[in-house]
Structure formats: C-alpha cells, structure tokens
Image: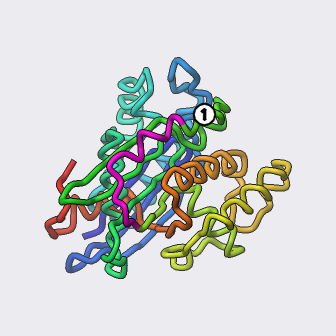
Amino acid sequence: MRVAIIDIGTNSTRLLVTDIINNEIIPVLSTLESTRIGEGIGKNLEIKTQVLQRTLDCLNNYKDKCLSLDVQEIRVIATSAVRDASNRDQVVQMIEDITSLKVDVISGEKEAYLSFIGATSDEDISNDKDNLVVDIGGGSTELVSFSNNRLNCNSVKVGAVRLAENREIDNVNHVLKPLIMDIPKNFRLIGVGGTITSLAAIQLGLEKYDPNLIQGFVLNLAVIEKLYYDLSKMELEERKNVKGLQPKRADIIPFGIIILKNIMDLLNAQEVSVSEKDLMHGLIMEEFINKKSKYPSH
C-alpha cells in the first residue's frame, strides 16, 4: 500500500510518501517547501489570505505528485499555526474547497504523541534509559516521555517562527518550564524538527541533505552553543550560504537554537540524539502499521 502524509506546519509544508510492505515503511519521496503559514500572524492570530496562498499552491503541487506516484491514500494534518488561528475554521474550509484534501487539525498533545511514536520507532534505540523526545517546530515546542507505564505529553506555544516574530527571548525560559514536569531521572534526549536536523546537517557540512547521515547523529551542548554563536553573529545573507542550512530557514535558525539551549539547560542535558523520524512517521505507525503500540493513544 502506498500512502502519503502532508504536514502543514508553521514554517514549512512537508510531504512524505511511503510504501507499506509487510508492516515495514519504505520511503518513496520526502520533500518540503517553506510556506510559512504562520508568518505575520500577530496577536490577533489571523492567518492572512496572501500567506495562505503559498500553502494552497504547495498542497496542489503535492496532490499532483501523489497522483503521479499512484498514492492510494493521502492524510493531511495541520499543527500549531492553524490550530491556534482565530480564523482556523475558515482556513481549513478554504484548503478543503480549493484542494479537495481533508485537513485534520491535531492538538499539541496529539502532535507530541505522534512525534514520540515516530522518533522512538527505531529498533536500535537503547532501552536502558527512558526516551525523552523534544520537537521544536515553527509555532510550538513539545516534550514527551514515557515512564512508569505513562505517556507524558506537554506542548507550549513557542517555536522558531513565533519567537523570531515576537522577540520575547527573555521570556523563553519561563514559557518552557511547564514542559519539564514529570520528566524521568535517567533519560535519553531525542530531538526532532527542522532546527535540530538543520544543526546536524550544518555540523556535518552537508552539501546535500542526507536523512541517513542525520538519523542518530549526536549533538552535544558545547557544539550547539558554538553553532549558535557562529550563526547569530552572521548577517542574514551570509547565513543563507552556510552548508547544511536551508536558505529559507536562515532567518529563524538562531531562535530555534535559543529554544533548544533553554530546554537542555532546564533538563541539565549535555547531548541530544537527532531523529529524522517525527510525527509524520508516527502517524503512519499509528494509522497504517498493524502493530499494537505499547503507548496509550492520544
């Protein structure tokens, strides 16, 4: 069976096409466009029509790709920007009317849950520590752990795009603190999302993004702090030319790193393992793979 997942995020809209054979996920196509639906959303949390148009164009393009690849089922999810938008219902209706794609706006807790399922799906992940997954998105950040037979999913409204626009850097630590409730003492920190995968790609100096090199790469706190220092002192145009960094992410990457650094400081974590597999992979696991999850569904 060939399925596609489309994720409408605050910063980018992503497409993942996979074949499911004998309960195994075989990647066919993975791509993204920096549509930034959360741009200029402001205090009234309204998604502007001209901003939405980028996402509509992208979705129609993805739909055509899916048709050409003979995809049998398409699932579309929307996260932070659409979830929090004051005109959420109108935005979803417009997307569905123009693209004929049904959109599922998922909660922050569901987003956290799916990210955890995806990030911890690799069999080589160690079981000697409780896994703790951090997902830094454009509009929100999630932290998820599983301990004492319980899945703890926490989400807060701070992400790389949101922080870049409101510049409330001094308030970041305060906003992030609710994430660290019920955290296991002995944990392995796993990171997903564009900020963290970009840092791995930059550290590796990748001319072309390679998911196989990103998966499982370990970033230590000293390296993250050095990358933040180097990137934040660059002018935007210089940052756009950094190997491993998508040019359209250049303006928000320092703010994503600020969030990551603050979380690691709050957790007293010295390193984070990078995962290419996130909520999109988690959704496939949850919806299409016939394996009973050991985690309670959200």
Mark 1 lies on residue: 39
Number of labelled discs?
A: 1
Q: Is residue 291 above or below residue 35?
A: below
**Could you say where residue 159 lies in the image, as x and y percent from the top left?**
54, 42
Which residue appears farthest toward the top when viewing the image?
44
Q: Position of residue 263 (x, y in %)?
A: 53, 50
User: Horizontal and vertical percent for residue 146?
Assistant: 27, 59
Query: At 32% from the left edge and 55% from the top edge, which residue is drawn?
Result: 114
Left or right position of 166 against 176 = right
Q: Identify the image's colour scheme: rainbow, by chain, secondary structure or one colour.
A: rainbow
SS label for mark 1: loop
| Residue 79 relative to residue 169: left or right | left
**Observer-nearest of 186 and 73:** 186
Badge 1: few (under 14), some or many (20 or more) residues near its Cα, within 10 Å? Answer: many
Q: At x 21% / y 63%, what residue is drawn?
A: 288
Task: Inspect the magenta stretch and tell me whether residue 185 lies in it.
Answer: yes
Q: Amino acid at mark 1?
A: Glu
Q: Residue at x 30, y 41 (%)?
A: 104
Q: On the rendered image, what quadrant is the N terminus found in? A: bottom left
Identify the residue shown where x is 56% and y is 56%. 194
Residue extent of the magenta highlight: 174-187
Q: Position of residue 36 (x, y in %)?
A: 58, 41
Q: Is residue 165 covered in magenta?
A: no
